[in-house]
Amino acid sequence: MNMLMKLLATGISLGAGFLGSKLVDRLWTGFTGNEPPRHGKEAEAEASMRQALAFAVFSSVVAAIIQVLADRGARNALAKLNK
């Protein structure tokens, strides 16, 4: 059962991370009208340092919130499975 719990927690975290990155990209594009400054994209070469730092802070805040919510969700799901 312990392995099942670890797999469930990992699956929830991976899914939340994927959805979170999509959410950050869409919100950034919606607010700024520009592509997110990511490595390997042409937008990165054109992005100012201010934009790159703002995106880094914004994505870090969203990632931290998602991590907390995913952890809580995994704990709740595991508690329900254990009952």
Image: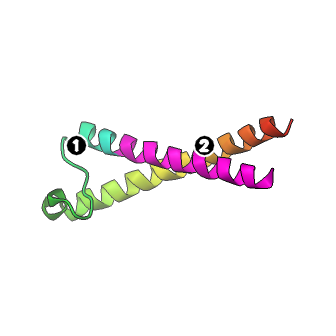
Q: Residue 48 location in percent, x, y?
A: 18, 61
In this view, the residue in front, 2 or 79, is 2
Q: Which residue is mark 2?
A: 69
The relative height of residue 11 versus residue 42 in the rendered view (above or below) is: above
Q: Quadrant of the C terminus?
A: top right
Q: Secondary structure at mark 2?
A: helix
- Mainly helix, strand or loop, the magenta region? helix
Amino acid type indicated by mark 2: Leu
Figure quadrant of residue 54: bottom left
The relative height of residue 83 versus residue 75 in the rendered view (above or below) is: above
Residue 9 is inside the magenta segment: yes
Q: Which residue is mark 1?
A: 32
**Residue at 26% of width from left, 64% of height from top?**
39
The residue mark sitting in front, 1 or 2, is 2
**Residue at 40% of width from left, 52% of height from top?**
59
In this view, the residue in front, 1 or 67, is 1
Q: Secondary structure at mark 1?
A: helix
Amino acid type indicated by mark 1: Thr
**Residue at 73% of width from left, 49% of height from top?**
4
- In the image, is 16 to the left or to the right of 42? right
Q: Residues within 10 Å of mark 1 (few under 14, many from 20)?
A: few
Q: CA distance from mark 1 to mark 2?
A: 26 Å
Q: Residue 50 location in percent, x, y?
A: 24, 60
The total of numbered circles placed on residues is 2
Q: Residue 58 location in percent, x, y?
A: 39, 51
- Specify the segment rendered in magenta: 1-24
In this view, the residue in front, 71 or 51, is 71
